[in-house]
Amino acid sequence: MFGTSVEVPLWLALVAGGLAAWALLDRLLLPSARWYVRSRAAKVLAEVRERLKIQPRPFQQIRRQVLIDRLVFDDKVQQSAKAFANERGMPHEVALDQVQRYAREIVPAFNAFVYFRVGYWIGKRLSQALYRVRIGYTDDAGLEAIAETATVVFVMNHRSNMDYIVASYLAAERAALSYAVGEWARVIGLQQLIRAMGAYFVRRNSKDDLYRRVLERYIAMATEAGVTQAVYPEGGLTRDGALREPRFGVLDYMLRGYHPEGERDLVFVPLGLNYDRVLEDRTQLRAGDAAAARTGGLRAAWNTLAFVAGQVGLLLRSRWHRFGYACVNFGTPVSVRAWLASRGVAIDGLDKSARQAEVAALGRHLMGEVGRLVPVLPVPLVATVVLEDAARARSEFEIKAEVATLVAQLQAGGARIYVPRSDWDYAVSAGLRMLVQRHLVDEEAGLYRARAAEEALLRYYANSIRHLARMAPASKPLEAEAADTSPAATAAEGAAARAVLVR
């Protein structure tokens, strides 16, 4: 009867209200939001097509659920699931459920609006807020010569989690990069953003054969479709600052479906990165020290918050400075088609062991090129010098003279040295000032000496260019150069220093 009130329990009213709100969200708000984001993405994609050298591929514009279904029902994945189920005596449907979970975990959801508007803005602002970001060297002619139909893969060293941000920001005028991101980034909110940026998640060191087969097939599908990717053959962050021994599993996945006579070439672009300060430097040193106490998750979070609070405190007192220079060098592209032709090899006709040997040879060549491209920056230069006879105190002039000797040695080996403001005197002063501010080098009465307790951290930065010094022609050790302190020797050394520093 009209006007009659009906009493219902509070919990039932809350449930009914929640269901009504969910229906409103699902049927009205979410479709509108999806339509808005997709329409914005389409507009952004139309804009960037006019300026990008390497265009986003149709594969990246397919709805994520369709890509997941294609991966799950791929013939090779299905065969692997069947073999996996038979080996373990489980129903085939159970193995397929696992494949579904793996596919959902791996497959990205690229959105041009998120990548070129949100991600690019965040990457640019964050990179420029923390570092003086520079492109040191680029083989423009080689990059321009890459065929539009080629699949391009950037191969780089891995010093910091900032690598993802800095490289994407600097490469955004050429391509949208798809990264393999570790499980550390699988955090609610962050993982959705990373997927929308076109990255895919990987489990490092997974021993699950079925998972690796699903991952392999996704990488092969993306490579065959021409998706521009970025890989770190080192597999993880450097622990001691030096280049790690590379792994070539991802390169192998990319090459398994490659056919030299096919329409699409596979082109690897070496890329070298370096920083005057790595945000994770102490964390990585501790992780690489077997004797160091393990840090729990809460302690790590506390250390991170303390670091951020300290930086904010410096900012509020107008004493904060950016963390020096971050530099990227883009090298000469390596065409797999040309590489195989020069070696007289048809990789698609090789057995497993021969193919892996060929992949390793290509991988070592690429990592050799990446190593040569690692930028030489002020802090690694000064750290290298002060570690030579670390107990000896030096004046700033002596440090600049020894840096000059090191620079000449590195230049003879073809190293790519970035000179801030084209002023070597400023560069060395800036590197030394940063080490003093971080209390890695002590200053007393105008003399500088490596702090004994921080030699491991100094070596971390020196290690970033150690391999470049090894490539250089043999020369006298730096301590031998500094041993002769006679007036004549000092004058000659000063002249040599000025000649190199002014160059």
Image (cartoon, rainbow, N blue to C red):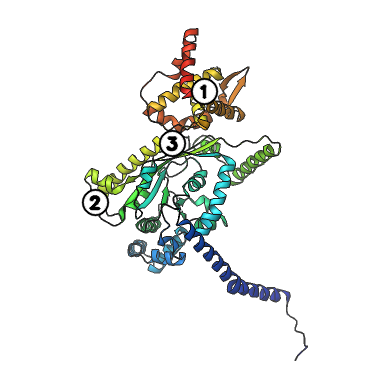
Ranked by sequence position, the earlier of labels 2 and 1 is 2
Q: Is residue 109 in view?
A: no
Camera-near label (3 vs 2) is 3
Q: CA distance from mark 3 to mark 2?
A: 35 Å
Tell which circle, 3 or 1, labels the residue nearer the N-terminal end: 3
SS class of the residue under badge 1? helix
Q: Which residue is mark 3?
A: 374
Residue to which mark 2 is pinned? 351
> Is residue 458 shown above or below 217?
above
169 or 208: nearer the viewer: 169
The residue that label 1 is drawn on is 386
Q: CA distance from mark 3 to mark 1?
A: 21 Å
Q: Is residue 291 in view?
A: yes
Q: Position of residue 245 (x, y in %)?
A: 39, 39
- Looking at the picture, how far across and down is residue 217, in whole percent? 36, 58
Q: Residue at x 60, y 37 (%)?
A: 322
Residue type pointed to by label 3: Val
Q: Quadrant of the N terminus?
A: bottom right
